[in-house]
Amino acid sequence: MAESVKIEIKPAKGRPMLTWVGKKPLRNATAYPAQLVETFHAEVEKSAASKSWEDWPKELPQAGLLFHGDNKDVLAWLLANGFRGKVKLIYIDPPFDSGADYIRKAMLHEKRGSTKIDGETYTLGEQIQYTDIWANDNYLQFLFERLLMLKELLHEDGSIWVHLDYRRSAHCRLMLDEIFGTDNFVNEIIWHYKTFQGQIKSYFARKHDNLLVYKRESKFTFHQIFETELDQTIDYERWQDYIDKNGNILAGNMPTQDSRFMRYLRKWKEKNGREPNNDDIILQLKGQAIDSVWEFKGINPNAGERTDYPTQKPEHLLRKVIETSTNVGDLVLDCFIGSGTAAAVAQKMGRRWIGADINKGAIQTTTKRLQGVIQEQGEKIKSNKQKLPGMEESDENPAPAQSGFAVYRVNDYDLQIQHNEAFNLAVEHLGMTRTKTDSYFDGTLGRKLVKIVTCNHPITPIDLEEVKNELKARPEEERDIIVVGLGKEMAIDAWLEEWNKLRKQSNVPNKIEVIELRSDPKYGGFFTHEPAKAKVTFKHNDKGVEITINDFISPTILERLHQQNKDNPLFRPQIEDWRSMVDSVMIDSSYDNQVFNITLADVPEKKNDLVGGKYQVEATKGSKVAVKLTDMLGEEVLVVKEI
């Protein structure tokens, strides 16, 4: 889809109806183009496509889909591109209207101790979507519009699970009644988690979340699930290994070496006065059917699944949701993906998945997490411990539905605020002189012409091409150019290097530079953003290319450390190893200047582990090798070398 199109949205017709100031129906939505920016494929043998993909849009990869952008734009894109009525399970964990100011926090990788750094709060676009919706009525309209669109995507056998807490569960239930109809209400699940909260004298400790479950139509997918009394926080698959899908004990597979299980059997014998027989054991292994109150803890601080994302939910919770509402190969959607739990669990359980988030940090966290899951699955497939995608999908331990994923940006989204407001702030901050008589350039800064890019998207090569074309129409113009924006795409640096190469060596006019502005109220409003930089060498050898990262520096991290310790400069943390600032390294051995295909990923598993910094990849002569470094605050640096 090359151009934006209008998508019709059916009105809600249910009762009762919740009313708020400014409530209005969503008659249609604009579907903007989606730009493929990154792919990741596990290195495993490919198999024939599963029947699960027969209804998949042919122009899309048979892989997980991860979208960065306003989820209203993402949902419109999905509706316009063949996903209407295709999603079997929608799980969303939207903002709870808590007024929380979620700041991205990061921990520098260090061998000795650790240093915490605070990132920016929401980027400008995220402030528009999240900060502004905390007002009561805006929040309700925000959810109302997205729920209307989600209903359009839901399969006739599908269900939607909306994860909330005490602040908005009552309002959202009425809203869901209106959109889906009271007859399609299935359950209100109470997730009760036990955490220490100290003594509260003015009210009962709030220890639960609410999950509202609605079906699309009268028929929907529902599987009764069971849980043992052994340990509700353990991985349920461990116990499923002892019995087959018919409830029969698998030969030679009794858990006699498991001390917890044997202790449980001894207690059973003491309670019942006899040895347990075959049926007794099966009952305990299979467990009791769970009800609408789920009691288990949140994420253990030492759990391997922990990502330090502020609103992360435990995998155990999503396992229950997905197992109840889907079959192997079904499609799961989470448009508030956060730390990526829904996608990660869907991947582990052999389901297809789509995720989206407006927060770039969420996309980066999810991307890194899914790479680890898929790589682990790839190793199991190589060692014959897990089947290939598309094979024997009805197995108790299903094969992954996909062996990779693709990341898209919708509506060229990265930063979005009102252009006039941002324009005036930029003019004031830079100290530039407005030029109202010029039909293209916005002013001057010294002897240089200034062009401020519209603030609803980052600076792209297309913007620079427009500057180039304007200069062609002004052959007498010899001044250099400054292009100002709130962000920039990674391809900008390569474009500028090519354009300015000739101008460094001769008297050719019109050198172009880019100033990237960011907004951070904590540190004083607009400031000129100095990008992170990396020194990388490429050495061709018989095996391909040896890549060595010699140095990396993130001025943003250094500035954060300076600001956090400005009252005590003597104790300002020092960066002894550049690798402590790097969250991950990705390599594309045949980069095409558009889509970054991850062929090698270096993602430290533990907090104190460092990236390697030296890599060997296969690459053909004449190809471009790209190295992408992401720092601990999510800023990316792309270094490209033609071999």
Image (cartoon, rainbow, N blue to C red):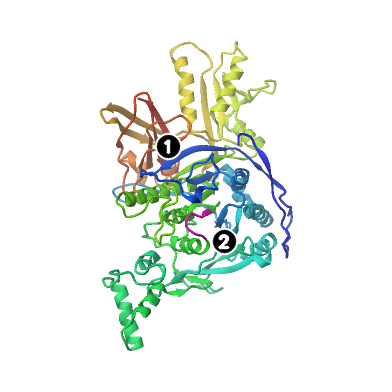
Q: Position of residue 310 (x, y in %)?
A: 48, 55
Secondary structure category for the residue under label 2 = strand
Of callouts 1 and 2, the N-terminal one: 2
Residue hosting label 1: 597
For disc 2, the neighbor class at 10 Å (few under 14, some 14 to 19, many from 20) is many
Kindly indicate whether the residue at mark 2 contacts the one at mark 1 (C-beta within 8 angstroms): no
Which amino acid type is marked by label 1?
A: Asn
Quadrant housing the C terminus: top left
Residue 329 on the magenta segment: yes
Q: Quadrant of residue 598?
A: top left
For disc 1, the neighbor class at 10 Å (few under 14, some 14 to 19, many from 20) is many
Q: Is residue 445 visible?
A: no
Q: Which mark is residue 626?
A: none
Observer-nearest of 608 and 90: 90
Residue hosting label 2: 161
Q: Position of residue 263 (x, y in %)?
A: 30, 77
Quadrant housing the N terminus: top right
Q: Is residue 176 above or below residue 422?
A: below
Q: Position of residue 274 (x, y in %)?
A: 32, 87
Residue 551 on the magenta segment: no
